[in-house]
Amino acid sequence: MAKKSFACKVVTPVAALVSDEMTYASIPAWDGLMGFLPGRAPILTRLGIGELRLDYADSSKGKGGTRAYLVEGGFAKMAGDQLTILAERAIPAEELTPQQAAEEMRKAQAMTVSGTGAEARAQQDRKNAALQRARAMQQLVSGSKGI
């Protein structure tokens, strides 16, 4: 009989946020969303910026549920039935407010790009990342999936 869940850990430099059984996980890989189910082939991928969605398995603690996090940077590794997410930043969605999202968007849009060459490209990359983070925050606080 196929296994119905897999172990998942989410760790940041400052805290271990999750260590539980999941039935599904959706992560923002650097090149797009990636889904994980029990029995998935091994993979190592770099994280981008966006929503991490975790669907918890039913357990002795109670009925499962879904939690979302805003993650930014890091890596995810699936090996066996263990998904490990090492994120540079991970903020639970319930801790985000519409005011924070609006402020992040305002700051990102106000960023300027000047000069030429490598410095201008680096400034544009920082602005693009800030805009992506602000859009992801807005989607999480509004409950939309951006699809």
Image (cartoon, grey):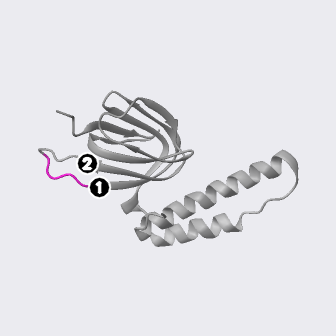
Which residue, as the protein is rendered here, is positioned at the far right?
Answer: 116
Most foreground residue, 3 or 12: 3
For label 2, count other residues whose C-alpha is less than 10 Å away and answer few (under 14), some (14-19) or many (20+).
many
Q: Earlier in the sequence, mark 1 or mark 2?
A: 2
Q: Residue at x 62, y 70 (%)?
A: 106
Residue, x 45% and y 31% (percent of image)? 43
Residue 85 picture location, percent across and down: 42, 38
Task: Determine the residue positioned at 32% across, 38% down.
Answer: 8
- In the image, which residues are magenta? 61-65
Decide: marks 1, 2 in contact (CB < 8 A)?
yes
Instruction: List the residue tagged with mark 2.
Output: 56
- Is residue 104 rendered magenta in the image? no
Question: Disc 2 on helix, strand or loop?
Answer: strand
Q: In x, y percent, where is residue 60?
A: 11, 44
Q: Which mark is residue 16?
A: none
Q: Please tell me which residue is depicted at 44% across the width and 63% down the height of the picture.
A: 145
- Is the residue marked by circle 1 packed among few (<14), some (14-19), or many (20+) residues within 10 Å? few
Which corner quadrant of the image does residue 115 belong to?
A: bottom right
Q: How far separated are the C-alphas under marks 1 and 2?
A: 6 Å
Residue wearing tag 1:
66
Q: Is residue 42 above or below residue 129?
A: above
